[in-house]
Image: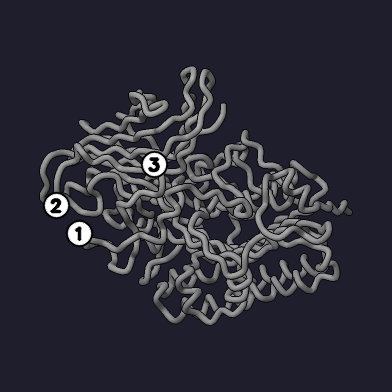
Amino acid sequence: MSSRMSRRTFLVSAAAVAAAAGPVTGAARAAARTPKVLVIGLDGALLSRIKDADAPNLDALTAAGLTAPSSIYANPLAPTLSGPGWSTIITGVWPDKHNVKDNNFTGARFTQYPDFLTRAETARPALSTYAVASWNPITDTVFSAKVDTRVSTPGAEYDTGTTSRAVARLRDGDPDAVFVHLDNIDHAGHSYGAASPQYLDAIHGADAQVGQIVAAVKARPTYSAEDWLIMVTADHGHTDTGGHGGSTLQERQTFLIATGPTLAPGSVRYDVKMPDVAASALAHLGIAIDPAWDLDGRPVQQPAPDDFDTLRGVLRSRADETGIPAGVLGFTHTPPAGWSVDNSAMGGAGVTEWRGWTFTTDEFWTQAQRDQNRECNVRARNVFAVADGDEWYDKALTGSFDSTLVSPAYPVTGAGTAVLTYTTHYRQEAPQKGEVLVSYDDGTPVTVRTYTADVPSRTETVTLQVPAGATSARVRFRYTGGNNWFWVIDGVRIGGS
C-alpha cells in the first residue's frame, strides 16, 4: 500500500479519426481497425531510473514508439502527491481546474472535469471501459461510476492482483479503453529511496508486469484487426533518499512512453505534458475534443511545435547560475528565425543567463531558484521565453531591466479582426510591468494588454481590430522592472477571428 493515500464494436478508420479529432501524423492505416487504448500508470517511477534498471519490456516500448520526459507543478499549485498527479493524468487538466490538492480529494471538480473513461462513455455508451488500481482512490474516487468496470485491488494482492485482473480482462473480454495502476515502485521509493537497488528491483518487477499486460494485448485473437495506443506514465518522481511532495526537479519528474501507428519508433519529444494522456486516449478513440471541456491536454498524435521549440538544439549550459547542474543545457539568447530581442534600454552586466529575454526550459529555469512559483509555469511547453528580473539582479549590474521580445510579422487582413494567442505566466512586484504591443505594417506599436498583477499560467487571447489596408501585424512583449519577479511567454500566434 502506498503512503498516499454485450456491446457494439465501434470501427473507426484513419479518416474517421482525423475528421473527429484533427490531423493525425504518421502512416495511414491500411484498413479499418478497431481503435483501443491501454494506459499503464507506474506510481512514483523515474524515467532516469527505468533506463538504469533491468526493464526489457519498457525498453521495448521505448524502442517501438515515443518517449517524452516532462515535469509537473509544485506548491502553491499543488504538491507532488499522487492525488493531484493521477487526477491530472486521468482528467486531462491541471490542478487549478480539477482542484485536487492532496490525497483527500476535498473540493475535487470531477463533475466539471471528469476522467477520460467517463468522457468516452458519455460520447459513445457502447464503448467498453475498464479501470483497475492498486491504490484504491483512483478507482473509488477519480474514475466515476459511469465507467463500466472499476476494480480496487485488495491490499493483500497488491500489484500481482492488479496485473492478473488486467490480463484476464484483456484476454477474456473485449475492452476498448483500459487503465491499469501499479504501485510498488512508489512503495520502494518511500521505503528505500530512488537511488537504492530496491527501487531498481521494483522497476524490474513492474516491468515484468507491464510485459504480461502488453503480451495479453498482443495475444488477443482479434489483435490484427485492432489499433492499439499503449501509454505508460507516472504521477510524480522521488528523491534519492525517498519521498515526494516537494519542489525538487526529481520529485517533479514524469514521462510518457507511447506506442501506436502514428508515433515514430525511437522518437523523443519535449513538448508533451501530463494532461496529454487523457486527450490522446480520446483522440485515438475517435472522440472529438470539445473546446467547452477546457482540457489542458492535447493529443500526442497531433504535435504543435512553436518557433521557440526550434531552439532546443542550440541551448547551452549555465554561465553564472551555479545552482543549476553543469550538464543541463537550457538557455540561449539567440532568438528563433524571424524573432528578435531589443535590449537597447537594458541595464548592464547582472546574471548572464537572464540579461534580457531568454529562451529556456523548465528543467533549467526552475533550478535557478525553487519555491518562487516558477514550478507553476505548467502551460508553457518545451522551450519558452522568460524575462526574469529577480534572477538577473543576483549579480552586480547597472541600470534596470528593460527588454522587448519582438515577433515576426504575421499576415492579417485589413479592416477585419485577428486573434492574438499566447501562453503566459506572470508574477508581479512593483515597479515591474509587462506590456503587449502590436504594430501594423511596422507602424507605431500600440499597447493591447498590460500586466501589473499576478497572472497564473494560462492561455491568453486578444482580439485585434486590424486597420484598413494593413497586411501584417508584429507583436512586442516589453518587460520593465528591477529586482522584481518574472514573465513567461510561449506559443505565440495570430490567426483569424
44 to 497, vertically: above or below: below
Residue in the image at 29% along x and 37% along y: 404
The crowding category of the residue bearing disc 3, from other C-alpha atoms within 10 Å (few below 14, some 14 to 19, many at least 20), is: many
* Res. 203 in view: yes
Percent coordinates x, y for residue 307 in the rendering:
45, 48
Instruction: Using the numbered discs, state the Cα–Cα distance from disc 3 to disc 2 in whole angstroms.
Output: 24 Å
Pick whichever of labels 1 and 3 is earlier in the sequence: 1
Q: Which residue is mark 3?
A: 489
As helix, strand or loop, the secondary structure at mark 2 comes to loop
Pick whichever of labels 3 and 2 is earlier in the sequence: 2
Residue in the image at 80% along x and 53% along y: 13
In-front residue for pair 153/493: 493
The crowding category of the residue bearing disc 1, from other C-alpha atoms within 10 Å (few below 14, some 14 to 19, many at least 20), is: some
225 to 494, vertically: above or below: below
Number of numbered callouts drawn:
3
Percent coordinates x, y for residue 483 in the rendering:
18, 41
Which corner quadrant of the image does residue 250 belong to? bottom left
Type of amino acid under label 2: Lys
Percent coordinates x, y for residue 311 in the rendering:
40, 55
In-front residue for pair 237/226: 226
As helix, strand or loop, the secondary structure at mark 1 comes to loop
Q: Which residue is mark 1?
A: 320
Q: Which residue is mark 2?
A: 395
Residue in the image at 26% along x and 62% along y: 318
Type of amino acid under label 1: Asp
As helix, strand or loop, the secondary structure at mark 3 comes to strand
